[in-house]
Amino acid sequence: MDRVIPGTLTLVGTPIGNLSDLSPRALEALQTCDFIAAEDTRVTLKLLNHFGIVKPLISYFEHNKRERGQVICDRLLRGERGVLVTDAGMPAISDPGEELVAQCHEQGIPVGVVPGPTAMATALAVSGLPTGRFTFEGFLSVNKRTRREHLASLVQETRTMVFYEAPHKLAGTLSDLYETLGDRPLALVRELTKIHEEIIRTTLGEAVTRYGAEGEAPRGEFVVIVGGAAPVQRAPATPEEALDIARQYVAQGVSPSEAARRAAADTGCRKGEIYRLLTRGE
């Protein structure tokens, strides 16, 4: 009996608002697959109807992912070609699809990807906050202890931080961020690629006031981008500390001149001064 070659699970990024953002490759993947696994089949059906695509849908979300994941894997192992989508953006990013991807890898099922829009990167790009290094924190837990521990771990984080938040939880999240991190530069990006897209550059303190109990009612899904902590400034090394470092290099067999150079690079002290102290008394 011939061995069945597993089908491929293809992750397909879908528009985060504007349906015109669906790429030609994503459209082809949806048209040619055997079935589509979707977080919310009702949302995905609207997308498919817009493009005239008719495909079998299977629901895959947080509360059925364990048993449904194996059902999907079994179909792929029989040679079917499946597509995984989330409600909007890239599946498996802050999304239960993460577990299905791992499940496929464990069972030797090929996984492919058709990249598409992501709210995280799109919002970060237009935020005006530093983008060279950032950390994606997703949704904060509703469990008070877990939430508190998560935020406490970010107090000294120097990279720009990116969160997702629903409108009805935004005020509480802003308050918790302000209480834990203090006032920081902030960008609130809402309704990306939609008619009411808005980029609000402010601070945590101002945002708490704006969306507090007596303030404005938030509308739409938010990406919350918070400036990182200021880097801790270390006191400059003394010549004696630089000398100790140079002596450690010498003990490793490095020449005095090279040891002085390396110690200068490590500490910011002048090479000549370090070399003079190092060779004093020779």
Image: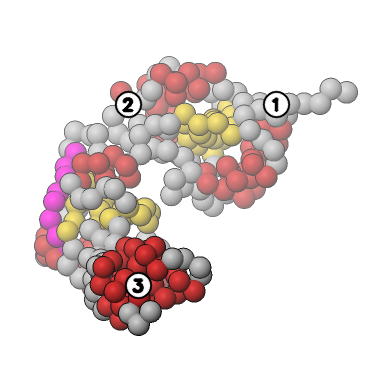
Instruction: Tell me the quarter of the image containing the N terminus.
Output: top right
* Mark 3 or 2, nearer chain start: 2
Residue at point 19% right, 39% down?
Answer: 197
Which of labels 3 and 2 is toward the front? Answer: 3
Amino acid under disc 3: Ala
- Which residue does the numbered mark 1 point to in the structure image? 79
Q: Position of residue 56 (x, y in %)?
A: 56, 26
Alpha carbons under labels 2 and 1: distance apart: 30 Å
Q: Is residue 170 left or right of residue 94?
A: left
Placement of 62 over or under 215, stated as above or below: above
Amino acid under disc 2: Asp
Q: Quadrant of residue 6?
A: top right
Label 2 residue SS: helix
- Residue 99 in view (yes/no): yes
Span shown in magenta: 197-204
* Mark 2 or 1, nearer chain start: 2
| Mark 3 Cα shell of 10 Å, populated few (<14), some (14-19), many (≥20) | some
| Mark 1 Cα shell of 10 Å, populated few (<14), some (14-19), many (≥20) | some
Q: Quadrant of residue 144?
A: bottom left
- Residue closest to the eye, 156 or 57: 156
Residue at point 32% right, 75% down?
Answer: 242
Alpha carbons under labels 3 and 1: distance apart: 47 Å
Task: Please say whether residue 27 is one of the residues in the magenta stretch.
Answer: no
Label 1 residue SS: loop
- Which residue does the numbered mark 3 point to in the structure image? 152
Instruction: Tell me the quarter of the image containing the C terminus.
Output: bottom left
Report the residue that reaches farthest toward the right: 1
Q: Which mark is residue 21?
A: 2
Residue at point 25% right, 53% down?
Answer: 225
| Mark 2 Cα shell of 10 Å, populated few (<14), some (14-19), many (≥20) | some
Residue at point 20% right, 46% down?
Answer: 127
